[in-house]
Image: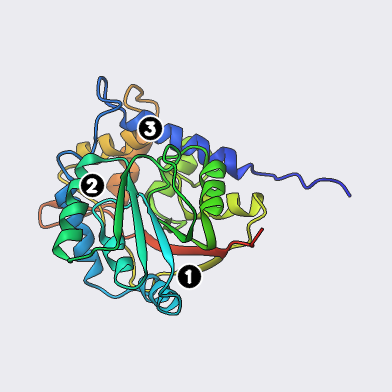
Amino acid sequence: MQAVEFVTDWIKLWCELVEAQHEGWQVEGQVDADVWRAKARAYHETVMRRWATPDSSRDFIAADLNLHSNDTVIDVGAGSGSWTVFLARMVRHVTAIDPSPAMLEVLHENVAAASLSNVSIMEGGWMQVNVAPHDVVLCAHAIYGTADIQAFVKKMEAAARRRCYLLLRTPLPNGVMAEAACHIWGQPYDSANFQVAYNALLQMGICANVLFEDSGCWQPWTNASLDEALADVKRRFALQDSSEHDVFLRDLLDRRLVREQGQLVWPGATRSALVYWDVRAS
């Protein structure tokens, strides 16, 4: 039997999208800086506003873990600790891992405020830390900065005795950034996201389950002006030093963004998907 040839190499595409985003957001002289230093607390407040609305992902994971209360869980890219605190109330132990000292400072505060004694906290990136196997490994919106999705996922599987969870953003196919990506790159993916990740998992031989959150689209982006919106888009596509696509992008933004209360509001185009699969015992 001949080996299957993938028309699109999704693993490679993921890598290219992550590297393009890194290039777009790189600040000279601050490549290794903690990018969350000035915004970790504001980020946590934004997450808490989103968490004020029930969603199917949390309900599903809670139902699973309430049946496995003796489980141990790794929270990869734990950030300010929203998932860590949520998980620790249901299971025996949670190990929270994050590379940002600023995020970990907020996480420590949130764990202490919740009076939790079953949480361990590790500073470092997922691909750099050494951690013993746990029953469940969860990564909520923290894989986007890793170019090698295959290595990242394989490490998740190696560290999980029972199940892996990935939460990923899912842009709508007719979004503004999708239209921009089609024009600039010839395909609709402007960044690493669910669509690319799921196909990469299939390419790796992982047939995962998917649950789309039922709480609707995320809070839309806003910009103060068309010039600011154009600058943001160019940064996301690493086009700061090029004007080749400016005419198209300015027309696109002028056509599709809506002015409300003195701001330009992007159409809601992103929601979350919960991707999960059971790890086979070796």
Q: Residues within 10 Å of mark 2 (few under 14, many from 20)?
A: many
Height in image: 162 above or below 81? below
Is any part of residue 256 visible from this angle?
yes
What is the basis of the colouring in this image? Answer: rainbow
Question: CA–CA distance between discs 2 and 1?
Answer: 29 Å
Of helix, strand and loop, which one carries label 1?
strand
> Residue tagged by mark 1?
211
> In the picture, which quadrant includes the C terminus?
bottom right
Q: Residues within 10 Å of mark 3 (few under 14, many from 20)?
A: some
As drawn, the label of residue 22 is 3
What is the three-letter code of the residue carrying label 2?
Answer: Leu
> Residue tagged by mark 2?
104
Q: Residue at x 25, y 68 (%)?
A: 51
Height in image: 25 above or below 65? above
Q: Position of residue 87 (x, y in %)?
A: 33, 67
Of helix, strand and loop, which one carries label 3?
helix
Q: Earlier in the sequence, mark 2 or mark 1?
A: 2
Q: Are marks 1 and 3 in contact (CB under 8 Å)?
A: no
Say which of 115 and 126 sits in front. 115
Report the side of 15 relative to 251 (left or right): right
